[in-house]
Amino acid sequence: MTVATASAKSACAMKTLTVLGSTGSIGTNTLDVIRQNPHLYDVYALAAGQNVEVLLGQVLEFQPRVVVLSTLEGLERLASGLRQKGLPRERWPELLSGPAALVEIATAPEVHIVLSAIVGVAGLEATYEAVRNGKRVALANKEVLVSAGQAVMEAVRRCGAELLPVDSEHNGVHQCLRAGNREQVARLILTASGGPFRNTPKEALDLVTPAQALNHPTWRMGNRITVDSATLMNKGFEVIEACWLFGFAPSQVDVVIHPQSTVHAMIEYTDGSILAQIAATDMRMPIQYALTYPERAQAPVPKINWQEPRAWDFAPPDMDKFPLLRLAYQCLQTGGSATCTLNAADEIAVEAFLGGRISFPAIAAVVEETLSRLPNRQPRTIGDILEIDKESRSLARKVTAERAGVAAPAEGGALRNSAVSVEA
């Protein structure tokens, strides 16, 4: 059953964490779990993108030893904020920037657990290296397994790392699989809220706006994942992740629409029995589970009140209206670089939709055309995967521009693979 391959440490001992993506939804919820359990967790390092204002508050509260930002400009703003707050220089964390710095804080000997929540492939290398160093990785970054599932899972097995899923659906599967014999499980069932357009006629999707797509009925997440939930691409990514995490074939993983988002996942045994993992829609529960596994601890989340009447609905997904879910299954079956291109093209298409350059249905059209125009190949290294990701993004930009009738935007400069520090 398990994706946790190393012997688990006692949940009672103090654990030191690196949080990759500390200012996003998962990162802030993780820090709230730590805030509720200061006797259990110590923050070694925080890494963020551009949200310096939120990061500054986190640095002052949690006093990490190292902080990594994506740009030097961000580091300078953080340093300025620390000066304005009057924090003595000797109490500052070490300030670093660049991909090598992410690897450094993910592999530091002092770190027991790495929370991987950086959106996109920016977090791939650091997460992979944490696995190679035998860390426990609490995984909330979909791109890690969608783009590099084979390489990452081979490293988990080879290096004795622990990979604990934070996504509520995979976390639910992980919990269900603890209840019985893995060989007797016939299939996994992942639930999806259906997003804001589950009842919208297909012909009306051409008119939906970014604001409507970002109005998720259940969860509060970042912009890209919220749009991916509206297209069901997010659920497609979760199918891919589930197959890598738990060793199931695509045909053994089903998706059902469950608008209440209370049943997070189910497993069906060969005799027809079904086990479900049920919890409130609060990401702090799966985050804490990934941190304390195999133990459980009191969590700062609301409990379900069984004295209140409630109704739960389940329905099959409409893959004609939401073709990206179908594409995800196809790419998983194709193998090779297909899922990497799927992810990269989707990110570019979502960006174009949010920028008003393409329609909502055109997201799927851009992804499908990018897949059809880029040859599939077999990546052997993380470097190969990053190169395929770059090529896929470049082609997706061209496809998007062609559909929008404008010139393709210039490629952004890549961060050097180096650690850069900022002095006081």
Image: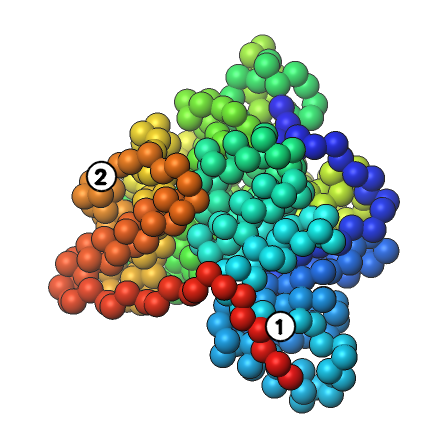
Q: Which residue is mark 1?
A: 95
Q: Is residue 342 above or below residue 250?
A: below
Q: Count the marks: how many?
A: 2
Q: Is residue 191 above or below residue 87?
A: above
Q: Residue drawn 25% across and 68% down?
A: 410
Q: Residue drawn 49% across and 24% down?
A: 248
Q: Residue drawn 40% across and 55% down?
A: 227
Neighbour tally class for label 2: few under 14, some 14-19, many 20 plus, Cα within 10 Å: few
Rendered image: mark on residue 232: none
Front disc: 1 or 2: 1
Q: For residue 328, say whether it is visible.
A: no
Residue type, numbered disc 2: Pro
Neighbour tally class for label 1: few under 14, some 14-19, many 20 plus, Cα within 10 Å: many
**Location of residue 262 by image quarter:** top right
Q: For residue 351, say whether it is visible.
A: yes
Proximity of marks 1 and 2: CB atoms separated by less than 8 Å: no
**Location of residue 255 by image quarter:** top left
Position of residue 372 measured from the top left corner of the image (x, y, whole percent): 20, 40
Which residue is the extreme one toward the top?
271
322 on left or right of 23: left
Q: Residue drawn 48% across and 30% down?
A: 243
Position of residue 56 measured from the top left corner of the image (x, y, whole percent): 65, 76
51 on left or right of 237: right
Q: Which residue is mark 2?
A: 375
For label 2, the SS is loop
Foreground: 159 or 19? 159
Position of residue 317 measured from the top left corner of the image (x, y, whole percent): 39, 35
Residue type, numbered disc 1: Leu
